[in-house]
């Protein structure tokens, strides 16, 4: 069982989470409800109804199939729980995610690769198409697929001195259409093309300038607080009509991606297995 149980948090959840996080940063053992064996942690703050979804695959939160599945299941839990909002973050002090686990891509088994992509597609539909408000608390570097998930959210706060972007071009990976649509839903088509064809990793200042993030935070708790403040903006807005409007804005992208799932999967498999990409992966892994 990869996921922690989705239990309603006690009223002092914020305090418990703060104690737990501080202890993690100091490498201490804590006896609160965080279980270190689980890949994605889901907590709900009973005071405001916001769920926190925390990636928990040290050392760098690289996405292998198991982490992707854990995220998919966590998003199901948030949906089922009728959360008032969701904050996506990472447990690792200065890293949100390194992107795909290169070991998942190097000399990949095609069946597993197809499953990996299919679960990634599921995550996209669940996150991009969610009706509840979403925010990404980017507590550190976020150079690839984690950036994709952050861009699916409605708001992003990133800690200063972190880098954010989709570096796939540098590894010889052609960027799939869903990624392009997702980035284009946040910044202009021209900036999307430039960012993706150069594999640019943006500093926090540049990311803010171009509109990839909404705020720069001083540290992880500031980023988290900014995300909560964003979600608070909807507290007096009726959730059903809000969700319907959000879905309507995103509907066209979702229909097109849904209609092309198989084609996107084939293209991803081709892109990963192409010799140029495989030699970059080998070089990365020192093979
Ligand atoms: C409907 C929707 C359908 C489709 C969706 C569409 C699109 C999908 C999304 C994206 C498409 C774009 C393509 C993305 C492909 C990728 O994600 S490939 C991964 C690219 N990532 C990178 O190039 C980042 C490389 N890593 C770093 O820059 C640094 O590691 C980082 C800044 C994150 C952290 O630095 P630092 O704290 O110094 O740590 P180390 O570098 O020392 O790393 C610690 C150990 O972790 C290993 N590691 C790092 N990254 C990876 C990785 N990606 N895979 C596997 N392992 C990794 C590193 O080697 C160290 O290991 P060691 O301790 O040496 O054993």
Image: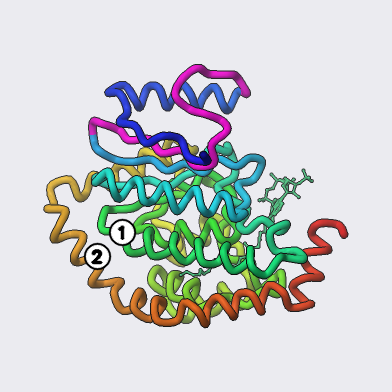
Task: Tell me the quadrant of ligand 1.
Answer: bottom right
**Left or right of 48, for residue 256:** right
The reply to whether discs 1 and 2 touch (Cβ–Cβ < 8 Å) is yes
Residue 26, image quadrant: top right
Label 1: element kind: loop
Whether residue 90 is visible here, answered yes or no, is no
Residue 226, image quadrant: top left
The dot on residue 246 is 2
Question: Which label lies toward us, 1 or 2?
Answer: 1
Q: Is residue 205 above or below residue 267?
A: above
State yes or no: residue 159 in magenta: no
State the residue at coordinates (52%, 78%): 264
Start and end of the magenta stretch?
27-47
Q: Position of residue 29 (x, y in %)?
A: 58, 19
Label 2: element kind: helix
Q: Position of residue 206 (x, y in %)?
A: 52, 61
- Residue wearing tag 1: 130
Closest to the observer: 92 or 111?
111
State the residue at coordinates (62%, 23%): 27
Q: Is residue 89 above or below residue 147?
A: above
């Amino acid at each position: 069982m990869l996921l922690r149980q989705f239990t309603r948090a006690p009223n002092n959840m914020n305090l418990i989470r703060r104690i737990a996080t501080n202890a993690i940063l100091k490498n201490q053992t804590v006896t609160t409800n965080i279980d270190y064996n689980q890949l994605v942690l889901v907590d709900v703050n009973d005071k405001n109804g916001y769920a926190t979804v925390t990636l928990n695959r040290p050392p760098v939160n690289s996405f292998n199939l198991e982490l992707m599945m854990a995220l998919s299941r966590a998003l199901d839990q948030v949906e089922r729980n009728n959360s008032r909002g969701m904050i996506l973050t990472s447990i690792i002090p200065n890293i949100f995610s390194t992107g795909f686990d290169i070991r998942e891509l190097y000399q990949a088994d095609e069946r597993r690769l197809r499953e990996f992509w299919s679960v990634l597609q599921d995550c996209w539909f669940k996150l991009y198409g969610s009706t509840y408000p979403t925010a990404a608390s980017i507590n550190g570097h976020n150079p690839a697929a984690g950036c994709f998930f952050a861009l699916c959210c409605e708001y992003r706060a990133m800690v200063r001195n972190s880098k954010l972007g989709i570096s796939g071009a540098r590894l010889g990976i052609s960027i799939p259409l869903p990624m392009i649509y997702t980035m284009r839903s946040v910044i202009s088509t021209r900036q999307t093309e430039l960012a993706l064809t150069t594999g640019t990793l943006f500093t926090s200042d540049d990311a803010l300038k171009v509109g990839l993030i909404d705020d720069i935070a001083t540290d992880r708790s500031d980023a988290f607080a900014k995300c909560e403040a964003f979600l608070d903006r909807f507290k007096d807005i009726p959730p059903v009509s809000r969700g319907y409007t959000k879905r309507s804005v995103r509907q066209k992208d979702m229909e097109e991606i849904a209609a092309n799932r198989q084609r996107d999967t084939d293209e991803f498999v081709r892109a990963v297995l192409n010799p140029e990409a495989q030699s970059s992966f080998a070089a990365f892994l020192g093979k």
